[in-house]
């Protein structure tokens, strides 16, 4: 999961960036699953499966240039 802070775009802008991620993800073996937007605080959270953190970052970089501030390797709880 990654976190983007100080995002100045709207939820619509984030949706467009997510679509670009979906179009690019296959090249890097990544699967962007969900995203969440907090317009008030300017934060975006993206959940994806990838072979590694770098692959997830590459998708954002190539798709739209909006790289994450942090990437966390997380596991789903039961």
Image (cartoon, rainbow, N blue to C red):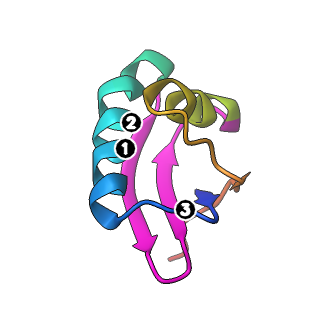
Pointer 2: what residue?
Answer: 21
On screen, residue 20 versus residue 67, left or right, reads left
Residue 25 spot, x, y in % from top left = 41, 28
Q: Earlier in the sequence, mark 2 or mark 3?
A: 3
Secondary structure category for the residue under label 2: helix
Q: Residue at x 51, y 64 (%)?
A: 44
Residue 2 spot, x, y in % from top left = 61, 55
Q: Residue at x 57, y 30 (%)?
A: 61
Q: Residue at x 29, y 27 (%)?
A: 23
> Is residue 32 shown above or below 35?
above
Alpha carbons under labels 2 and 3: distance apart = 17 Å
Between label 1 and label 2, give the one nearer the viewer.
1
Between label 2 and label 3, give the one nearer the viewer.
3
Q: Residue at x 37, y 44 (%)?
A: 17
Find out whether the residues at labels 3 and 1 contact each other: C-beta distance under 8 Å: no
Secondary structure category for the residue under label 1: helix
Q: Quadrant of residue 74?
A: bottom right
């Amino acid at each position: 999961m990654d976190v983007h802070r100080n995002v100045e775009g709207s939820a619509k802008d984030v949706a467009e960036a997510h679509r670009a991620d979906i179009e690019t993800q296959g090249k890097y073996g990544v699967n962007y699953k969900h995203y969440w937007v907090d317009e008030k605080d300017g934060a975006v959270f993206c959940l994806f499966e990838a072979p590694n953190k770098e692959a997830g970052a590459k998708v954002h970089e190539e798709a739209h240039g909006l790289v994450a501030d942090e990437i966390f390797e997380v596991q789903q709880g039961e």
